[in-house]
Amino acid sequence: MKRRLSWFLALSVLLLTGCIDSYPKPAPRSLMDINHSATADSQLAIAVDSGGAKYLLHAECPSGSNPSCELTYEMTHIGEVGVLWYFTPASGYTFRNPDIVVTDSGPAYMIWQNCPANNVNGRECSTWYTTSDQMDPQVLDLGTHSLSAPILASRGDTVYAVHEVTNDYATGSVLRFCRISDAGFGCHFVSDHPVADDGIRRTNPAAAVSTAGSLHVAWLQGSGNSKTGYLNDNYGAVDVDMAHELQYETGPFFPPAISIESDDGYLYIAMAADESSSDWMRLYYCAPSDCKNVGGLKTIDLPAAKSWYFYGGPAIASTSDRVWIVFSAHNNDHINQGDLYMTACYPNGSTCTPSRLEPFYTGTDHACHPRIGLVDGLVPVIGWHICGFPTMADDIYFYDLVNGKKIIHSTDWNGRGGLDMAVNGEYVAGIWNEIQSDGRLATWLAFNAHMTYIPAVRK
């Protein structure tokens, strides 16, 4: 998809109003080693602090089979590189699945997997972490083997890590958490943890932190069409195994999404099911201080007669009185194109009825990889790709639903992998990968206050 230069410039205006004196011109960023390439999957993460600084952590890999990928960490502000750091694995190993958060007081926390380069999906990976003020990577939760992407969850200056672990012979797995913002922290169990291997995977954790500093984790247990949703938390006892496990229903679920209201009023979990006739979605909610039982349940208004089909799970974000849900789907109204749908749900008897967002793209492909955040805790901002035949992706969008400000970056089907987006106060930033003219994949960054976007690649 081609767009005229005037259209391009028009879309480079403010996503949201920013008050700074000068802005950088959109230009290539000298960050990626010329002998390395970004990845075709979602090996990237971003966080934004209250002053608008962006913290990026993304993978770069040399060419060839079983590459030893390194991680690039950078902190930028107004498009200028403030800190640039490379994490390089030992020979025969590779770094993958990064995540990053930033605290109110400043330090960023980073986490990733360290795996044998020739067996990244095996049972010999470990979880590593570090902080931006230490830059001294350490193994997290010694004695465990990391099975999937670890995640971070934070609020204020409290940061938790959650990861799926096993030993080197078990076929099942368990979830554990570590409050890594505490000095001398320990690690504890999120899920049940039978002494004997039960062969059951506990996967797809989604996590949120309350203002009280408690960690709340939703996950799936099982496989195929028999995945059961669970929730657990450490409310009232943060440094012990979680003891408030709540079981939801069983079905063919996508990974869950979780969010806590800004005033701790309610915790929300959105669960979408991949059914053969028509997909459906439910919203569970409870008070963070008492989630031993379901406080409420809503079925999102998706009439089965329209034959809904989801492209992955939902993304959610909550204010002080509601939760916003965004997801990608097609139905009988738009059978050849997957669109984004959005709804606001309240913890009362009202109905959650999604609306189709503006059809930015009118081709026969579909929106994918939705992300959502709230500017100043209120204004929904979403980011997404247009996806075609895997793994190709086209335009990237970041859109403020209230003020109508947006950025569109046309990639002519050069996009690969997913994207990540972060919001803090009035600041929004997004990160993604796409193919360059020399054939390499490069990481790109977009941010508001004149919403420039520039490739993170050395020319």
Image (cartoon, helix red, strand yellow):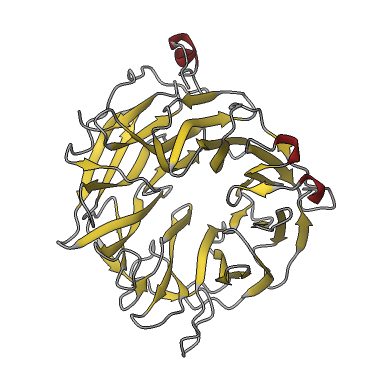
- Residue 141 visible within the image: yes
Asked if 340 appears above or below 155 in the picture, the reply is: above
Given residues 368 and 407, the one toward you in this image is 368
Q: Quadrant of residue 256?
A: bottom right
| Residue at the outermost top position | 6
| Residue at the outermost right position | 349
Q: Residue at x 35, y 53 (%)?
A: 98
Given residues 398 and 60, the one toward you in this image is 60
Q: Residue at x 30, y 31 (%)?
A: 436
Q: Quadrant of residue 319?
A: top right
Given residues 253 and 78, the one toward you in this image is 253
Left or right, 72 with respect to 45, comes to left
Residue 3 locus on image (x, y percent):
47, 16
Asked if 192 appears above or below 70 in the picture, the reply is: below
Q: Report the quarter where the C terminus lies.
A: top left
Given residues 199 and 105, the one toward you in this image is 199
Asked if 206 appears above or below 17 in the picture, the reply is: below
- Residue 50 visible within the image: no
Residue 361 locus on image (x, y percent):
58, 27
Left or right, 354 with respect to 409, comes to right
| Residue at the outermost left position | 91
Q: Residue at x 34, y 70 (%)?
A: 122
Residue 133 locus on image (x, y percent):
27, 51
Image label count: 0
Left or right, 391 with respect to 302, comes to left
Residue 338 locus on image (x, y percent):
62, 38
Asked if 440 appears above or below 200 in the picture, the reply is: above
Left or right, 295 with respect to 122, comes to right
